[in-house]
Amino acid sequence: MSLPRIEDLYDGLSLDQRLSRASTTVRTLIDRTLDGGVLDVDESMTLLESTGDDVLALIAAADAVRKTDVGDDVTYVVNRNVNFTNVCFVGCRFCAFKRQRGESEAYTHPVETILAKVQEAVDLGATEICMQGGINPAMAPFTYRDLLIAIKRAFPAIHMHAFSPMEIMYGARRTAMSHADYLAMLKSHGLDTIPGTAAEILDDEVREILSHKKVDVRTWVDIITTAHRLGIPSTATIMYGHVETPRHVAAHLRLIRDLQSETGGFTEFVPLRFIHADTEMHRDGLVNDPPPKGMYDLRMYACCRLILRGAIDNLQTSWVKINHDLAQLSLNAGCNDFGGTLMEESISREAGADAGEYTPVAEIHRLVRGVGRRPVERTTLYKKLDPTEGSTTRENATAADCAGGRSRGGEVLARPHHVH
Ligand code: SF4
């Protein structure tokens, strides 16, 4: 049996009716999650491999769980991605963002340029800067610390969401510091939270295929848990749709769940579809053509909501990866967060994503209201902001406010979709 069609979502059936049409096995597992139970890896795999009416039941259940656990508000954060360099020696085969030193499109922004980008974001009401870059061997050992110092000196109130575990590993190596000492140093200079990127699939055999120089699972876990213990929360991510199997996804979700039980430091979970086009993996035939966007993605979101229930409440859709229409639909498949506003989101664009680099706040509001929900601006740490302030003025900004390909007002900045 195959995946159902998107149109099947609109047949007006209730959750009970959908459950009655599901297979006994899947209905039993869904019932368990509805009662607050936790699935093991084999059971999670069963959900991840669902087809036909089982998928429609999963989506309806994920929507119900979302409503019960976090309500109907759809949150978003006004932020800006700053990719300070695209020079990288790591060579991940799924990455179309990286450039070699000396390539015509290689860049490393001077601090003045970065500060100007932050200023632009602050002028537009951004509360967060999400800063990541390539792993540039030419950088000075304390570059990451010095960037934080420069930004926080000029903008003490901005939330710095920066540096993936890969960058933390590299920075610690370059400075000959332990992960704990390095993270503590960054925190003392203004690091607030870190992106839980560079996770891809937390399985070393898969990682070897994706990028054999990448931070390994043990080190990723060490950096994330060390950060959490130091009071530096992080997001959690998964990159799906490449060489992984349902078992890899199920085990990844289990690991994230277990880490959350241990530290409580994850703020949200973000499933990121792998964008095939323009990547070495696709060119070299390591991955087939991607499955069509649609039910394949909604099944993933719904499974994440159910499998992570009780551990991580916030499930973020990724409009950059799956486009606006599908991101809107994902709000009925378990998601409660629309991510962020994005003035520059070059990672997915370089790999062939076509959703653009920004979504005006007005557009997010339109998409959210289009499914009968209330858009609410939040901080990085999910504090809801007064809807009568801030976003109301940003809501009036449109894409027409953008100048020269850069937003001039109200863009919705995507959450860090940098995958390294
Ligand atoms: S994903 Fe990150 S670490 Fe990997 S090649 Fe791209 S920029 Fe470098």
Image (tube, rainbow, N blue to C red):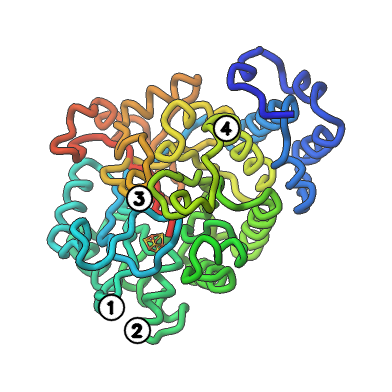
Residue 167: where, in percent of width, then height? 39, 69
Disc 2 to disc 4, how far (Cα)?
A: 45 Å
Residue 347's mark? 3
The CA span between labels 2 and 1 is: 7 Å
What amino acid type should be assigned to the residue bearing mark 3? Answer: Ile
The verdict on label 1 being within 8 Å of ligand 1 is: no
Query: Earlier along the polypeptide chain: callout 2 or callout 1?
Result: 1
Left or right of 191 in this view: 10: right
The three-letter code of the residue at mark 1 reads Phe
What residue appears at the point 24 percent right and 68 percent down from the top-left corner? 101
Q: Position of residue 26 (x, y in %)?
A: 80, 35
Please tell me how crowded label 1 is: few (under 14), some (14-19), or many (20+) other residues with Cα within 10 Å.
some
Please identify the quadrant where the N terminus is shown.
Answer: top right
Please determine whether, in this image, residue 370 is positioned above or below residue 306: above
User: Which image quadrant for residue 148?
Assistant: bottom left
Residue drawn 17% across the image and 51% down it = 119
Residue receiving disc 2:
175
Image location (x, y in percent) of residue 128? 32, 51
102 with respect to 10 (left or right): left
Among numbered discs 2 and 3, the one appearing first in the sequence:
2
Q: CA distance from mark 4 to mark 3?
A: 32 Å
Q: Residues within 10 Å of mark 3 (few under 14, many from 20)?
A: many
